[in-house]
Image (tube, rainbow, N blue to C red):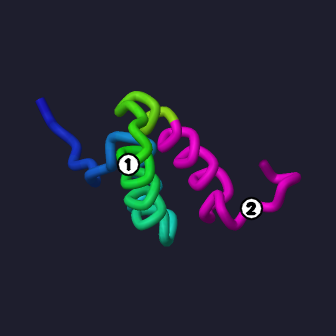
Amino acid sequence: MTTTNRSPRPSTLVAQACANVAGFQELFKRLKRRMKTSGRSESTLNNYARHLAQMALHFNTLPTELEDDQI
């Protein structure tokens, strides 16, 4: 049996966005801090972060830099 060497890939959308979109990791840290201080649940944070990561990966830029019509 042979195995193939695969390059390690981040497993979650958020991890992929942190690795591939400049500035996303800092954006995620700020989001996490705000969600915790406002008393939001971990589930809410995960859902918001996942959707922001999808947008960031699709457009290859931070969601905060998108135009309204792109959103």
Residue at the outermost left position: 1
Identified at 63% across, 48% down, the residue is 55
Distance from Cα at disc 1 to Cα at disc 2: 26 Å
- Residue 63 placed where, x, y %? 64, 57
Quadrant assignment, res 60: bottom right
Quarter the N terminus occupies: top left
Amino acid type indicated by mark 2: Leu
Nearest to the observer: residue 1 or residue 10: 10
| Disc nearer the start of the sequence (1/2) | 1
**Circle 1 — which element?**
helix
Residue at which label 2 appears: 66
Q: Main secondary structure of the magenta part?
A: helix
Residue 43 drawn above or below residue 32 = above
Magenta segment boundaries in residue numbering: 48-71
Q: Is residue 56 magenta?
A: yes
The answer to whether residue 67 is above or below residue 4 is below
Whole-percent x and y of residue 54?
57, 44
Question: Residue at point 41% right, 59% down?
Answer: 18
Instruction: Give the residue furthest to the right.
Output: 69
Under mark 1, the amino acid is Thr
Q: Which residue is most to the bottom?
A: 22
Image position of 32 (left or right of 69): left
Which numbered disc covers residue 37?
1
Q: Residue at x 26, y 52 (%)?
A: 8
Q: Nearer the viewer, residue 28 or 61?
A: 28
The residue lying toward the viewer, choosing from 33 and 14, is 33
Q: Which mark is residue 2?
A: none
